[in-house]
Structures are given as structure tokens and as C-alpha cells.
Amino acid sequence: MKIDQESLKKIAHLARLEIRPGEEAALLQSMDSVLTWMDQLNEINTQGVEPLTHVLDEENNWREDKGANTLSREEALFNAPSKNSTYIMVPKVIE
């Protein structure tokens, strides 16, 4: 498949790209090489090849989601920049 200047302008418009006049030739050549490569990939026989969702066979090891209090109140308040004896103080964000 060959890309002409009209197709390049249409693609640039759809992608909201501004192409300077000096860049057109290089972009046409680059897009042509990508499309040639894609044509080569389309020639490969993939009959009987299972599609992959990921290249590796690794799976996630999920842990059970359990709530736990791992900090005491004093430990949680220790590094807070502004606090009282019970809560972390934050700036007012709603008027």
C-alpha cells in the first residue's frame, strides 16, 4: 500500500497534527516503510497459532484483601505536619 500526499494530509488532520512542508517527504517515506513491514507480517502463516493476551505465562499472585490496623494512633500522627491529639489537620478546601 502506498501513501500519497492527500492521504498523509487526511491522516494528519484526523490525528490533529501539523505537518510542515519540509517534513512531508520524510513522513511519506517513513509511513511507506511501516506499511511495507505490515504487508510482510500479513504474509506469515498464522493458521493454528493461539492468540496471546501477554507474551509471558506469568500469573498474578493475589492476596486476600483483609483490613487490619497496623498503626497505632500515635504512630499515624507522629509525622503529620499539623495535628491535634486525635486527628490530622488539613487546610480547608470547601468554602
Image (cartoon, rainbow, N blue to C red):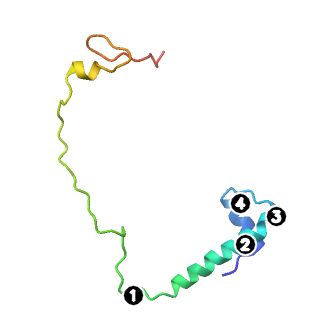
Label 1, secondary structure: give it.
Answer: loop
Disc 4 or 3, which lies upstream in sequence? 4
The residues tagged by marks 3 and 1 sit, at their Cα atoms, a distance apart of: 43 Å
User: Badge 1: how crowded within 10 Å, few (<14), some, or many (20+)?
Assistant: few
Closest to the camera, between mark 1 and mark 2, is: 2
Q: Which residue is mark 3?
A: 22
Above-or-below relation of 12 to 45: above
| Near-viewer residue (87 or 94) | 87
Left or right, residue 6 beside residue 83: right
Q: Which residue is mark 4?
A: 13
- Name the residue rendered at 71%, 76% in the picture: 3
Label 2 amino acid?
Answer: Leu
- Name the residue rendered at 79%, 59% in the picture: 20
The residues tagged by marks 2 and 3 sit, at their Cα atoms, a distance apart of: 11 Å
Label 3 amino acid?
Answer: Gly
Closest to the camera, between mark 4 and mark 2, is: 2
Residue contact between numbered discs 4 and 2, judged by CB atoms under 8 Å = no
Badge number at residue 47: 1
Label 2, secondary structure: give it.
Answer: helix
Closest to the camera, between mark 3 and mark 1, is: 3
Label 4, secondary structure: give it.
Answer: helix
Badge number at residue 28: 2
Above-or-below relation of 57 to 93: below
Disc 1 or 4, which lies upstream in sequence? 4
